[in-house]
């Protein structure tokens, strides 16, 4: 007979520093070991040991990107469990884990040929929430409902699948620490928004601006407005 090892899980979560790390990750952003250490008031070396314990018990997962390793909650079930504990637990003060890039840089940019920053991550979140996309972890795919929406938006999903590059995948956003849509599909969405005149990219640079038409379209089509993306405002790009 096999039963859940609740006592081990309780010991793992019961450590104040490890619980603090889980609380910081509840916001949904991926954070580095140094940021989690700073947020919980422990030394980086100590934080690394705590993170190893959390990962061994399948509470968090890590993603290596460039020179950094980012940590996030392993699943929605972990988030639900932590949230339930937060309801009955006494409040605990934690320091802010990190600062987001100020102004336009954090609002929107191109990551290679697809949209990143707050614009890219919020757009991706809406596509997932509406079940136009499904996230399989290392790859994303379009649902039957999504095929209809992308066709109406002017994107031929079938044609994109025939290209030699990856079709769609979650790309961890360095400023938002959430995923934005990468791959051929992500590039097609960005290109379509350029064609529609919602955004513009300056010549010989990774700079994008958003038009008033784009602001209205984002609000009506996707249900959100990014205040820092003002009309005719240029946004520095960084991949």
Image (cartoon, rainbow, N blue to C red):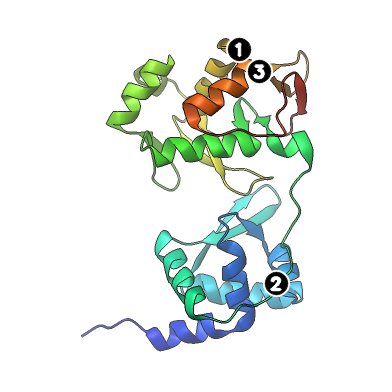
> What whole-number distance in Å separates the C-alpha atoms at marks 1 and 2?
43 Å
Q: Earlier in the sequence, mark 3 or mark 1?
A: 1
How far apart are the alpha carbons under marks 2 and 3? 39 Å
As drawn, 30 above or below 189: below
Crowdedness of circle 2 by 10 Å Cα count: few (<14), some, many (20+)?
some
Question: Residue 239: where, in percent of width, then height?
Answer: 70, 35
Going from N to C along the chain, the mark reached first, 2 or 3, is 2
Q: Mark 1 vs mark 2: which is more N-terminal?
A: 2
Say whether marks 1 and 2 touch (CB < 8 Å).
Answer: no
Out of 10 and 228, give the one closest to the viewer.
Answer: 228
Label 1 crowd bin: few (<14), some (14–19), many (20+), radius 10 Å: some
The disc label shown at residue 94, or none: 2
C-alpha separation, residue under disc 3 versus residue under disc 1: 9 Å
Residue under label 3, please give it: 212
Instruction: Assess disc 3: are there few (<14), some (14-19) or many (≥20) residues with their C-alpha within 10 Å of its C-alpha.
Output: some
Q: Which mark is residue 197?
A: 1
């Amino acid at each position: 007979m096999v039963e859940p090892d609740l006592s081990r899980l309780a010991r793992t979560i019961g450590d104040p520093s490890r619980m603090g790390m889980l609380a910081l990750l509840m916001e949904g952003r991926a954070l580095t070991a140094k940021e989690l250490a700073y947020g919980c008031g422990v030394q980086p070396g100590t934080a690394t040991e705590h993170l190893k314990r959390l990962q061994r018990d399948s509470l968090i997962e890590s993603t290596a990107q460039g020179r950094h390793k980012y940590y996030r909650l392993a699943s929605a079930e972990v988030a639900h469990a932590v949230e339930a504990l937060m309801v009955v637990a006494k409040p605990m003060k934690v320091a802010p884990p990190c600062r987001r890039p100020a102004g336009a840089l954090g609002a929107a940019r191109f990551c290679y040929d697809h949209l990143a920053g707050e614009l890219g991550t919020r757009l991706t979140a809406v596509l997932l929430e509406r079940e136009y996309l499904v996230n399989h972890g290392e790859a994303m795919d379009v649902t039957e409902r999504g095929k209809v929406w992308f066709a109406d938006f002017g994107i031929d999903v079938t044609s994109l699948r025939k290209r030699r590059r990856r079709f769609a995948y979650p790309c961890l956003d360095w400023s938002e620490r959430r995923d934005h849509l990468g791959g051929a599909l992500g590039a097609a969405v960005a290109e379509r928004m350029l064609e529609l005149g919602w955004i513009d990219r300056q010549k010989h640079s990774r700079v994008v601006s958003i038009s008033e038409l784009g602001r209205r379209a984002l609000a009506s089509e996707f249900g959100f407005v990014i205040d820092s993306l003002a009309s005719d405002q240029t946004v520095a790009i960084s991949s």
